[in-house]
């Protein structure tokens, strides 16, 4: 419905209610309606799920249509990201949000900073999703509010051309609300616990939930050691639980991202249940590191499985965990991915130890032999040393080609001494094109960085502290922060406006008319940035 049609509809409602509603202005009410397009988190989840499904289809048609996101840990960070995207690129198309369980644990837990081991309050996950979308909805209200002010000025000046232009812009306004891929870790318990938390996350606005195949109470960060996986059936129960949650809430297009940590996980807590050779449980157990047992030498407390008429003893650690055979990680990843897609997952996530396109592609090629349109979400992780990894990849390629690499120490390629070399330049170009190249070669539909704003906050704060508390003093803030905000057109230089002061003034006008005591008068120091 257009803005003008909304005014007409509300005017009819107000007129129908007679004198008691006589002081209500239809246009003011229409503005509030337009500024609050999404009434609930479920409205957001349904809207964004449809967008994400369309993007997945577009990627299937052409892998150049991959999508991207940056992890965010606060609503303000998400808001500024989307405002910047709209400012620089004119559209939010194929740009998403990512919610990282790591950042919730480290930054949003009531216990204080925690490692990424699912020890934080599970309720903090849906609470952050709701916060992110609250800030994005406020960005909509702010942007539309500025359009309404321009519209009023155009009408007052009798400027018909600008009036029509602004009405069209209002009707065609692109929301800051975009899809989110939200981390539910390993489900915070059994399948029922996963279902209950999934419902809360969906109700907060999540259209895509990412779940991993680690043991819930043994969960580790994907880039740390000590990871323990569960048998496939345990994981598939949680995938089904999430699908039921989506369907129960009417988000039929909801997306499930199945993450496998098998590449770096060498342990399991359980021997899978198996009834016949070759079933899923038997396939899982086939990766166990076992020794054939002589019945005459059985010792106390040993556990056995039988295979091909032989009695085998899986290697069990003092932690009561069982060990997989070395070198089986890729095979386990491929089986994890295939079975997840065959049982309701929509997208895959393979947690790797380095950003190497051919390593990822090798697994995806095998998965696609069974599921031709298999697609990945991939973590462009800050846990990787991107500079060192790609310089080593170039070094290795040069060495294989017979190119002279004697001027380089492979173990020390991170050194600033190599920054101006041809090798470093080639590595940087591979980093620049990594997302495009991996989308085309390795089936990566969505590229994300899990923790970028954690690192940018730390870096910018360090730079400011060094300058402000040092010789530069106030100039350290003015020169390197405020002046740059003004010169680069950063919206939050007018922080009162960003915090909703102008929206509040508009509401005061609607509610109190001439009696409104507004903040945005002549003495508001934000007017110093009018030309910014």
Image (cartoon, rainbow, N blue to C red):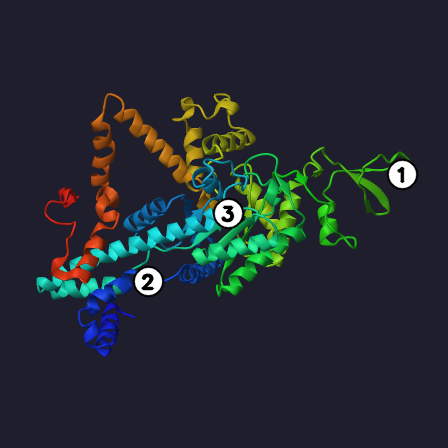
Q: Position of residue 398 (x, y in %)?
A: 51, 30
- Name the secondary structure under disc 3: loop
Mark-to-mark CA distance, 1 and 2: 71 Å
Observer-nearest of 486 and 529: 529
Q: Secondary structure at mark 1?
A: helix
Is 82 situated left or right of 315 in this image? Answer: left
Badge 2 vs badge 3, beta-carbon distance below 8 Å? no
How packed is label 2: few (under 14 Cα within 10 Å), some, or many (20 or more)? some
For marks 2 and 3, give the CA distance: 28 Å
Q: Quadrant of the N terminus?
A: bottom left
| Residue 85 percent across, percent down from the top left | 32, 49
- Image location of residue 356, percent across then percent down: 53, 39
Category of crowding for the residue at label 1, using alpha-carbon neighbours closer than 10 angstroms: few (below 14), some (14–19), many (at least 20): few
First-in-chain label (2 vs 3): 2
Q: Which residue is mark 2?
A: 37
Residue at 31%, 28% (x, y): give it.
463
Residue 295 is tagged as 1
Closer to the camera in the image, 354 or 514: 514
Of residues 411 and 10, the one nearer the viewer is 10
530 to the left or right of 328? left
Location of residue 294 by image quarter: top right
Q: Earlier in the sequence, mark 3 or mark 1?
A: 3
Q: Quadrant of the C terminus?
A: top left
Q: Is residue 255 above or below residue 469?
A: below
Cβ–Cβ under 8 Å for marks 3 and 1: no
Residue at image position (41%, 59%) is 41
How packed mark 3 is, by other alpha carbons closer than 10 Å (few <14, some 14-19, many 20 or more), is many
- Judged from the image, the secondary structure of the residue bearing numbered disc 2 is loop
- Res. 122 mark: 3
- Measured Cα–Cα span from mark 3 to mark 1: 47 Å
Which residue is situated farthest in the right direction here? 296
Query: Residue 497: x percent and y percent?
Result: 22, 48
């Amino acid at each position: 419905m257009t803005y003008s049609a909304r005014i007409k509809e509300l005017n009819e409602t107000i007129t129908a209610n007679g004198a008691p509603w006589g002081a209500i202005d239809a246009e003011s009410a229409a503005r509030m309606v337009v500024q609050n397009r999404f009434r609930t988190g479920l409205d957001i989840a349904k809207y964004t799920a449809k967008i994400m499904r369309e993007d997945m289809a577009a990627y299937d048609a052409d892998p150049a249509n991959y999508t991207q996101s940056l992890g965010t840990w606060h609503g303000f960070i998400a808001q500024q990201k989307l405002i910047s995207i709209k400012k620089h690129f004119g559209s939010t198309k194929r740009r998403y949000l990512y919610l990282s369980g790591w950042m919730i644990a480290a930054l949003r837990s009531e216990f204080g900073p925690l490692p990424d081991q699912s020890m934080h309050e599970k309720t903090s996950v849906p609470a952050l999703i709701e916060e992110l979308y609250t800030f994005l909805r406020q960005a909509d209200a702010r942007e539309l509010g500025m359009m309404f002010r321009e519209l009023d000025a155009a009408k007052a000046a009798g400027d018909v051309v600008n009036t029509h232009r602004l009405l069209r812009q209002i009707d065609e306004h692109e929301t800051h609300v975009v899809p989110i891929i939200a981390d539910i870790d390993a489900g915070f318990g059994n399948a029922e616990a996963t279902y209950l938390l999934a419902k809360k996350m969906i109700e907060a606005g999540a259209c895509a939930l990412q779940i991993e195949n680690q043991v819930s109470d043994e969960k580790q960060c994907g880039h740390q050691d000590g990871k323990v996986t569960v048998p496939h059936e345990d994981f598939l129960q949680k995938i089904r639980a999430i699908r039921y949650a989506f369907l129960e809430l009417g988000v039929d297009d909801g997306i499930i991202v199945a993450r496998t940590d098998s590449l770096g996980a060498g342990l399991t807590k359980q021997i899978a249940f198996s009834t016949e050779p070759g079933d899923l449980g038997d396939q899982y157990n086939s990766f166990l590191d076992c020794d054939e047992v002589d019945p005459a030498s059985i010792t106390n407390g040993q556990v056995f499985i039988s295979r091909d008429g032989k009695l085998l003893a899986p290697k069990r650690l003092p932690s009561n965990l069982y060990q997989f055979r070395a070198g089986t990680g890729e095979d386990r990843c491929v089986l994890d991915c295939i079975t997840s897609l065959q049982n309701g997952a929509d997208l895959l996530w393979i947690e790797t130890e380095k950003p190497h396109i051919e390593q990822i592609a090798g697994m995806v090629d095998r998965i696609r032999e069974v599921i031709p349109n298999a697609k990945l979400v991939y973590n462009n992780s800050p846990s990787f040393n991107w500079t060192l990894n790609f310089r080593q990849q170039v070094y290795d390629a040069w060495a294989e080609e017979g190119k002279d690499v004697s001027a380089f120490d492979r173990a020390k390629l991170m050194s600033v001494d190599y920054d101006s070399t041809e090798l470093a330049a080639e590595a940087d170009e591979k980093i620049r094109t990594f997302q495009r190249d991996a989308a085309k070669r390795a089936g990566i539909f969505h590229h994300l960085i899990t923790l970028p704003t954690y690192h940018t906050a730390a870096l910018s704060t360090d730079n400011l502290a060094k300058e402000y508390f040092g010789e530069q003093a106030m100039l350290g803030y003015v020169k390197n922060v405020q002046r740059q905000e003004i010169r680069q057109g950063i919206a939050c230089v007018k922080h009162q406006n960003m915090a909703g002061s102008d929206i509040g003034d508009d509401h005061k006008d609607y509610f109190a008319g001439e009696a409104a005591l507004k903040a945005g008068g002549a003495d508001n120091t934000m007017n110093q940035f009018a030309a910014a």
